[in-house]
Amino acid sequence: MGKENNAVLSYLEDNERFADVFNCFYFGGREVINPQEIMEASEVYVAEPAEKEGQRIRDIIKHLKSGVCLKILAIEAQNDISYIMPWRIMEYDCLEYRKQIRQVQRENSRKDSEGSGSVYKNAGERLGKFRRQDRIAPVYTLCLYHGVERWDGPCSLKDMMDFGLGSAGTSGEEWEKYFADYPMRLICVNDLTDYTGFKTSLKTVFALLPFRRDRAGLKKILEENPEYQKMDEETARTVSVLMGIKGFTEKQEQYKEEEGYNMCQAIQEMMEESRMEGQIKEQEKGIHILMQLLSKDYGVEKKEIADKLKKYYALSEEEAWGILKESV
């Protein structure tokens, strides 16, 4: 798991932001989920004794206890594209359901062994140790993709299938029609255009991410939104990681002002440094190509090569001859 993914998960551990994500993408911004009703839950699923594979660990999972109803909310964050993500989410959800069923079965078995009345009404209930009236909590999983590249992976289990041409007079489309699909609730931050549904600082963080490769768009959003000049420390650090601001932690005090951290300044400096680094890399690439070409021309004097380096790359006499001595 990379530092970008860690930054996103750490930021979303806060119950208000966690609730904000589900309220925005499930309920259009309506505050259906109350952060005060969210409880921590174990991210670990323990394997059966006979299973070879060990534990499974979810990114973030929480319990929503509203009244007498329990719901399981989970987020799987992705910085890279996973071409098996629908299956992974289905597996995690199934492990959660298995965990709940185990708990019901244990409780029923305990009551049965204690002789607490008639626990099972028929052979079917006793066989599965699960009664007709027993219920488990539904699981809601969001896949939050915050990578730079456009998502080109599958969005449901069906997208991973090869239905072929069919057989015995059937077509692949007929087989696909009866396939029990498992859809994935995918959120691609780069595709977001409307942030009005967010009530927390996620709005300002997510609004930046689509412009990581768009300098003009990034400059515009910074100029039009003063909140980027007064961010709290946790948000500022998260933005620094996701936007690729190098060494922010070491020099963050220089961006601190009375109302918060001026990330507008930090991002603008990052863009300028990135522009200069790009120019240097292009210059180094050009010099390397020129030196390769000139080294094959045995009739060219070293002074002529140095003169070309000075002319084409605005180098001083000393810099040109320094490169010449290293390369020729």
Image (tube, grey):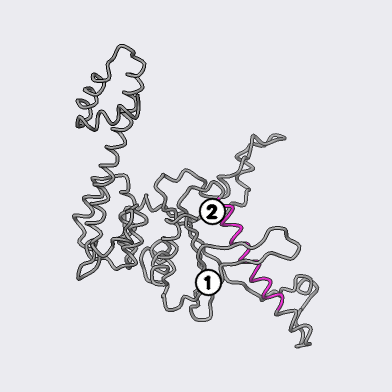
Question: What residue is at 52 percent from the left and 73 percent from the top?
Answer: 63
Question: Up-down: is 201 above or below 67?
Answer: above
* Left or right, 276 with reference to 74: left
Residue 183: numbered disc: 2
Q: Main secondary structure of the magenta part?
A: helix
Question: Sequence-wise, which precedes: disc 1 or disc 2?
Answer: 1
Residue 71: numbered disc: 1
Question: Up-down: is 65 above or below 181?
Answer: below
Question: What residue is at 76 percent from the left and 88 percent from the top?
Answer: 117
Residue 180: numbered disc: none
Quadrant of the rendered image containing residue 308: top left
What element does badge 1 sit on?
strand
What element does badge 2 sit on?
loop
| Three-letter amino acid code of the residue under disc 2 | Pro
Quadrant of the rendered image containing residue 95: bottom right
Residue 101 belongs to the span the image colors magenta: yes
Residue 46 belongs to the span the image colors magenta: no
The answer for how far apart the CA atoms under marks 1 and 2 are is 19 Å
Q: Which of 119 and 267 is in front in this view?
A: 267
Q: Position of residue 91 (x, y in %)?
A: 61, 58
| Three-letter amino acid code of the residue under disc 1 | Lys
Q: Position of residue 240 (x, y in %)?
A: 33, 57
Q: Nearer the viewer, residue 328 or 184?
A: 328
How many labels sit on residues? Answer: 2
Q: Position of residue 230 (x, y in %)?
A: 23, 65
- Read off the magenta span: 85-106
